[in-house]
Image: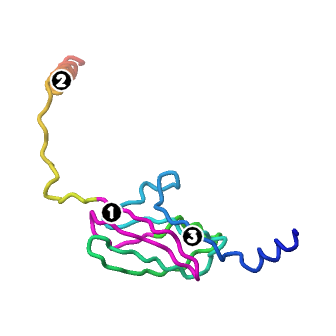
């Protein structure tokens, strides 16, 4: 019975394999997986799909536009965390899926972050609080007293 299982396992190792697809997160060692115009996706498993060509199908849900990117899945000896999908639109929903050989992933639906218009960023200097004014006055008076003391000690020192 065990021999039959080994033979079946050798004949169809990937017949029902599904490629996991997800955005990378801070637990993976990156700051974020979502950006205003890009996604950082986890790559297919290098032990199974290493050195094979992977196709990433992504669909702009809002406009119903399909696009495909292809890339080489790195071997396990290469330390590359993810695949950066660039050139996306800010604040847009996307459906993404991997295809390697005859294996495909589930569909991942994500939305890019919305970028602020640079003209909306407030760069003005806010007013000072009362405690900041008091500290500034005290430090200024202390500096004047220190400089006056140095000048007086210089003239009377000899």
Mark 2: give few (<14), some (14-19) or many (20+) Cα within 10 Å: few
SS at circle 1: loop
Question: In the image, which is nearer the foreground, mark 3 or mark 1?
Answer: 3
Q: Which mark is residue 19?
A: 3
Report crowding for label 3: few under 14, some 14 to 19, many 20 or more residues within 10 A (C-alpha).
some
Q: Which mark is residue 34?
A: none
Rendered location of residue 131, percent (x, y): 18, 23
State how far apart marks 3 and 1 are (Cα).
22 Å
**Which quarter of the picture shows residue 149?**
top left
User: Residue 111: image x %, image y %?
Assistant: 34, 62
* Quadrant assignment, res 57: bottom left
**Residue carrying label 2:** 131
Give the label, 3 or 2, closer to the camera: 3
- The reply to whether residue 136 is in sight is yes
Position of residue 56 in the picture relative to residue 1 (left or right):
left
Residue 59 shown left or right of residue 72 in the figure: left
At x 18%, y 60%, the residue is 117
The quadrant in which the N terminus is found is: bottom right
Q: Secondary structure at mark 3?
A: loop
The disc, 2 or 1, on the residue closer to the chain's N-terminal end is 1
**Mark 1, residue position:** 112
Observer-side mark, 2 or 1, equals 1
**Residue 8 location (% of width, % of height):** 78, 76
């Amino acid at each position: 019975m065990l021999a039959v299982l080994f033979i079946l396992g050798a004949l169809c190792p990937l017949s029902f394999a599904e490629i996991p697809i997800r955005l990378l997160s801070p637990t993976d060692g990156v700051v974020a997986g979502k950006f205003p115009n890009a996604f950082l996706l986890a790559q297919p498993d290098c032990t199974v799909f290493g050195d094979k060509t992977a196709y990433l199908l992504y669909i702009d849900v809002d406009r119903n536009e399909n696009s495909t990117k292809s890339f080489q899945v790195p071997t396990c000896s290469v330390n590359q965390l993810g695949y950066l999908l660039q050139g996306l639109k800010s604040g847009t929903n996307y459906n993404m899926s991997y295809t390697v050989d005859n294996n495909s992933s589930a569909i991942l639906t994500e939305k890019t972050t919305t970028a602020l218009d640079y003209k909306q960023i407030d760069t003005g200097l806010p007013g000072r609080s009362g405690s900041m004014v008091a500290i500034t006055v005290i430090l200024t008076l202390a500096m004047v007293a220190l400089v006056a003391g140095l000048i007086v000690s210089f003239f009377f020192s000899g």
